[in-house]
Structures are given as structure tokens and as C-alpha cells.
């Protein structure tokens, strides 16, 4: 929407650019910069998503990521200390980023687990029906506010 405002303003600016009043131009240029700045800020904010990681001791760790980030990316970019989490760096060769979702959150994930992910989850520590690997969950705006449980232990499928 902000980009439409900028385009509309730019079109209107060209229409009145023939006006010779020096008082109008600085105000219009200032307004255009303000609109562009607001549009950029809106786009940045629109891309942010929040996730809460709940440890087995009940500690809740809130983190911020971007739309398109995996949960593993968010753990890494926020320097969240989860022992051994993401040992294979998202290559789907371990199960250390195993997370447990609420049933309603699991059901609303846009992508279902692949056979490869299910194979890794079979090797995870204490998997459940709503277990997923954090490297395979890609955040969307609809998943903003997601809360996931971090299992008590990890089982590195590579060992």
C-alpha cells in the first residue's frame, strides 16, 4: 500500500512539476521523502515474525526473525543457547533441531513433513505426533507468534 502511495505521489508530483512556485517544491520533496521512509519502515516491520521457544524447565525464550527464515535460522540469528541445536546446519542429516508444536499450530503449517524429515524424526529424542525439525519449518506471516516446545534432550542422528 505504501508503494502505491509513493507511485501516486510521484505521478501527482510530475503533474504539478511545471508550477514555478519555489514554496511548493521543497514541501513536496520533503513529503515524498517522508512517504518513502514510512514505506520502507512498514516493509521492514511487515517482514518480522516472533517465535517463542519453551524449554522443558518452563523458560520461554522470545525471538524475532523474518518471513522466510527457518526456525533454525531464528535460533542462530538470535544466539539462543539450545545445547546441540542444529548440529548439521539445516542439511537434514541430524535431528538436533527437533521441536514439538501444539496440534493446532502443526495443522496450520503450510508444508507437511517430507519422507526425509520423517526419517530423521524417527531418530529424534522422544518424538510426538506433532514433532517437526526446526530447519524445515519456514516462517510465514501467518505463523507470527508461534510457540514451540524444545524437547528435554537431543539425539544426533549422525552418531
Image (cartoon, rainbow, N blue to C red):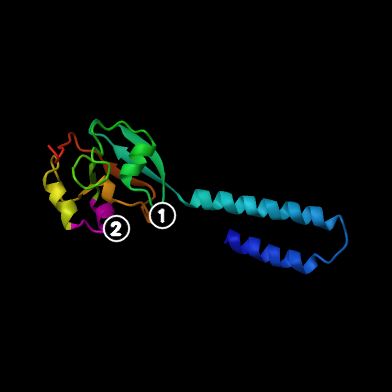
The residue under the point 75% across, 66% down is 14
Q: Secondary structure at mark 2?
A: helix
Residue 156 percent across, percent down from the top left:
16, 38
Q: Is residue 19 left or right of residue 98?
A: right
**Residue reaching furthest to the right:** 21
The residue under the point 55% across, 52% down is 42
Q: Quadrant of the N terminus?
A: bottom right
Q: Is residue 53 left or right of residue 31?
A: left
Sort mark 2 into few (<14), some (14-19) or many (20+) by Cα contacts within 10 Å. few
Q: Earlier in the sequence, mark 1 or mark 2?
A: 2
Task: Check the image and report above or below for 110 versus 135.
Answer: below
**Labelled disc at residue 108:** 2
Could you say which is closer to the camera, residue 88 or residue 84? 88
Residue range highlighted in magenta: 103-114
Residue position for label 1: 141
Residue 155 percent across, percent down from the top left:
14, 37
The residue under the point 27% across, 59% down is 111
Q: Tell me, yes or no, if residue 42 can be seen here.
A: yes
Residue 149 percent across, percent down from the top left:
25, 41
**Labelled disc at residue 110:** none
Q: Is residue 8 left or right of residue 25?
A: left
**Residue 153 sits in quarter:** top left
**Residue reaching furthest to the bottom:** 15
Q: Is residue 19 magenta?
A: no
Q: Tell me, yes or no, if residue 128 can be seen here.
A: no
Cα distance in 3D space between marks 1 and 2: 12 Å
Instruction: Please tell me how many numbered marks the rendered image carries.
Output: 2
**Residue 6 sits in quarter:** bottom right
Q: Quadrant of the C terminus?
A: top left
Sort mark 1 into few (<14), some (14-19) or many (20+) by Cα contacts within 10 Å. some
Residue 8 percent across, percent down from the top left:
66, 66
Amino acid at each position: 500500500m505504501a508503494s502505491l502511495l509513493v507511485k501516486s505521489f510521484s505521478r501527482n508530483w510530475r503533474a504539478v512539476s511545471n508550477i514555478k512556485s519555489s514554496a511548493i517544491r521543497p514541501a513536496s520533496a520533503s513529503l515524498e521523502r517522508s512517504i518513502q521512509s514510512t514505506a520502507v519502515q512498514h516493509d521492514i516491520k511487515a517482514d518480522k515474525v516472533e517465535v517463542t521457544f519453551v524449554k522443558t524447565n518452563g523458560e520461554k525464550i522470545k525471538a524475532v526473525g523474518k518471513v522466510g527464515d527457518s526456525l533454525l535460522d531464528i535460533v542462530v540469528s538470535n544466539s539462543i543457547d539450545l545445547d546441540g541445536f542444529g548440529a548439521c546446519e539445516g542439511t537434514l542429516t541430524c535431528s538436533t533441531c527437533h521441536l514439538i508444536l501444539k496440534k493446532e499450530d502443526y495443522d496450520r503449517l503450510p508444508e507437511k513433513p517430507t519422507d526425509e524429515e520423517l526419517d530423521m524424526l524417527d531418530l529424534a529424542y522422544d518424538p510426538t505426533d506433532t514433532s517437526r525439525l526446526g530447519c524445515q519449518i519456514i516462517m510465514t506471516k501467518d505463523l507470527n507468534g508461534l510457540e514451540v516446545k524444545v524437547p528435554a534432550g537431543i539425539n544426533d542422528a549422525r552418531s
